[in-house]
Amino acid sequence: MHPAISVILFTVTSGAGFGAVALIGAGYPLSDNPVFFFLTALVAGALAVIGLASSTFHLGHPERAWRAFSQWRSSWLSREGVASVIALTLFGIFVLARLFTDLPTQGLGWAVSAFSIATVFTTSMIYAQLRTVPHWHSWLTPAVYLAFSLASGFLLVAAAGKASALGEIPVALIAMLILLIAWALKIVWWQRAAGASLASRGMTSGSATGLGKIGEVRLLERPHTGGNYLTREMVHQIGRKHAAKLRFIALVIGAALPVVIAAAVAWWEFATPVLGLAFVAMLAGLFVERWLFFAEAKHSVSLYYE
């Protein structure tokens, strides 16, 4: 599949933003200073909004994006839109209530968390539901999306929060644990995807054309003499060597570096804002990981072109 920059930006930044929003709603201890609290909430919400807005640039007619909301009964894309609007609306009310009233906000906060997590889940299901893309069609896809969302969101709120420990466990050690779990899931995802070819799912040129029962089907000439929408969006080639290098880069920048930073914070008792460096590093690694997520995926329509 074509790794569109707008979609990569959307899935990475909105995931981090909604992960942070979910943790803030769940009651992660942020600064008692109202200005710092507002700025932290603003950054989390802005990441979510920027990600959602960037996704519209991948549409042929961005001005018609609002129409997607009407298909929530059958479309994961529509459900994502509905869940995100509810989550951000509730989050705005939650932040205002915390800043300007003495009303209890715990129940509202949990609702914010639930809809934020639901938004990330619906985003992942846009891809996980596609049987035509074996790389994505797995329960591991939503698991990875949710894990990365919570891991990156935790690094953000931990860097801005006032807590150096949650209970008896230092915040930096919790960050390390979440990071290791998230990237372990991704490694398992990569291993599963390596064997999830079109052929392994029974998809061949014969099944695509319906002529397989007659005999072996092979391409004589391509359907088109030039490029078209399908070849641009659904057919993308990346060499195994390049994929392996990019996976290594993603693991070094997005996993190893944040873990080392978190370990340094825990060992030398640095201030938790240092975890902001881990957050930036993880986002950089996730951009590489998400580029591969799309570039390595092979849609069944490619069977007509090879």
Image (spheres, rainbow, N blue to C red):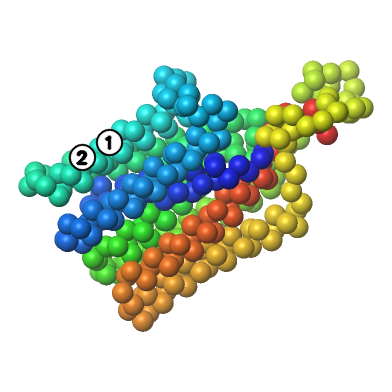
- Identify the residue at horizontal 76%, vertical 51% (top origin): 239
- Outermost residue toward the bottom? 268
Q: Secondary structure at mark 1?
A: helix
Res. 188 visible in picture: no
Identify which residue, 167 or 155, lies in the foreground: 155
Residue tagged 2: 93
* 1 and 2 marks in contact (CB < 8 Å): yes
Q: Position of residue 205 (x, y in %)?
A: 81, 27
Question: Which residue sits furthest right?
Answer: 220
**61 vs 86, nearest the viewer:** 61
Q: Residue at x 44, y 39 (%)?
A: 52
Secondary structure of the residue carrying numbered label 2: helix
How many labels, in total? Answer: 2
Q: Is residue 191 visible?
A: yes
Label of residue 89 in the image: 1
Q: Quadrant of the N terminus?
A: top right
Residue at 44% x, 66% y: name it.
278
Looking at the rendered structure, the kind of residue marked 1 is Thr
